[in-house]
Amino acid sequence: MSKYIFVTGGVVSSVGKGIAVASIGTILKSRGLSVSVLKLDPYLNVDPGTMSPYQHGEVFVTQDGAETDLDLGNYERFIDINLTQDSNTTSGQIYSAVIARERRGDFLGGTIQVVPHVTNEIKDRFKRLAEKSKADIILIEVGGTVGDIEGLPFLEAIRQMRKDAGRDNVLYIHVTLLPYLNSTGELKTKPTQHSVNELRRIGIQPDVIICRSDYPIPNNLRDKISLFCDVDREAVIPLTTVASVYEVPLVLEQEGMGKLIVDKLCMQTPETNLSEWAEMVRRLKDSQEPVNIALVGKYVELSDSYYSVREALQHAALFHNRHLNLIWVHSEQLEKTDNVDPLLRTAQGIIVPGGFGVRGIEGMIKAARYARVNKIPYFGLCLGMQVMVIEFARYALNSEKPNSTEFDPVTPYPVIDLMPDQKAVDTKGHTMRLGNYPCNLVEGTRAAKAYGCNPIQERHRHRFEFNNQFRKALQEKGLTPSGLSPDNRLVEVCEVADHPWMVACQFHPEFGSRPNRPHPLFRDFIGVAKDVLREGAQPALPLTN
């Protein structure tokens, strides 16, 4: 039977629960345990698919096509597992399911209440994941902060699980913040005490408290938290801010997290073995020579909008023993200038990620043109592929008219157009082409060389596609369709023939990258970019006597 670990957060949001959960999963997997993860999001949206990146960050897509919270990306990267739609549950999904059952008459004659009907639906999601995954440990993160009114049904459900699953099969971990007061030069424990008191008022006594802090936590504060929060001294785990999130599993394990968990859950496992992970972190710290990559996007004010892209670039840079120097370039800045060189001059590679809407598109097209003309490695993801096709079509057809019908519905050259099966869609939520689809690579192309296998499977999230009416004309000018759907109808990957590395894909390869196993397209992109000499990116001069 699966055992459950519930992770809550206190004091402030964005305290690092997601990374803590992912790191705990890494530690448990290194002990030979199988792990699955569930994120509970209290908002009433059914999923984050229709939410602005400015509010929610990126939308992470699972292999089975669920649009989910970005924390699932951290779970997958750290634990090296592929999750499904069962790993993200929102209040919107819960209430929709309960109301649908009421409308069918499942509760005929009964009054529908938060307890027990909503809480039972929540617990059913826990048990469903356990049954499907057969995992030894189900890690469940409760989104938001203790005290949020919308999170109360989730907290009540996890409180009930100790009785449902048995005391030895449930563990509660609370992640909290110890703020630092400059005026007195000290860390304060009172917010943590209040947060734990709120949990205890609900009926949950945490077994472990992870204390986040920007400064080292002295032992006397750990003793104080142990005393006032009624938690074992060794279960007060300090987690000081580190240079890289990939250090967190090592920090938690050094503080005894693995042994603490298996002891409290009455489990027998081998000792934790994080030697490969520690070596990866060592290499990450030792990588000094930079590789300058310009990320041209429309949501760059919030870097979490491109979380998986950023991490995939980091994985690839690490593979080549380089330090990633990410240059954030807002596409609207490029739109406003006739000379983009000052913004892109130091870039050894240019990447254009996904997005929606016309804002900033002409700036992205300028970035693609700059990369093509100046032979700078270019990598386009989803929208980034569509942008590359538009730019190349304008060059090949000697016209500024080629466009996507998403941005110009009456363009005479719709080189990017709405997918046929999307034309009858009139709702926005979960109606795109989503999840894994197969792709056949063309032998001899850069894409085929990168993957080294055929066919491939990659995750999608889009409505628009390459318009095959222009495939032959653009191919004659040097745009190579290098990845096609099995029926040859969809262009999934394309590349510019007479260019060092100008490759773009309609799917999202960033979701499949791992710290110790970078995605092949990201790996080869960085592999070419690192050897490009640009102003501000020259390698260090060799030492001379």
Image: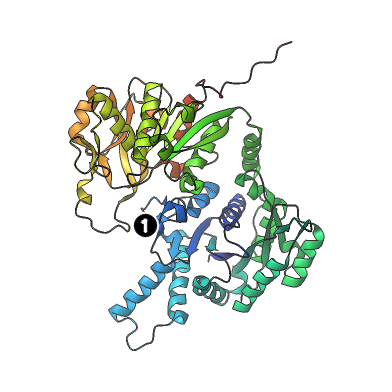
Give 161 or 262, whichever is nearer the viewer.
161
Residue that lies at the very extreme toward the top in this rendered image = 545
The quadrant where residue 413 appears: top left
Q: Residues within 10 Å of mark 1 (few under 14, many from 20)?
A: some
The quadrant where residue 165 appears: bottom right
Name the spot of residue 41 as percent of width and height, x first. 47, 64
Residue 271 appears in the figure? no
* Residue at position x 29%, y 33% in the image: 390
* Residue at position x 26%, y 41% in the image: 465
Name the image quarter holding the C terminus: top right
Give 81 or 193, whichever is nearer the viewer.
193
* Left or right, residue 226 beside residue 133: right
364, above or below 475, in the image = below
Name the spot of residue 237 as percent of width and height, x first. 71, 59
Q: Which kind of residue does numbered mark 1 sit on? A: Thr
* Residue at position x 51%, y 26% in the image: 346
Give 379 or 267, whichever is nearer the viewer.
379
Name the spot of residue 509 as percent of width and height, x first. 41, 40
Q: Quickly name the residue at label 1.
A: 50
* Residue at position x 43%, y 40% in the image: 297
Name the spot of residue 151 as percent of width and height, x first. 51, 70
Give 532 or 319, whichever is nearer the viewer.
532
Residue that lies at the very extreme toward the right in this rendered image = 220
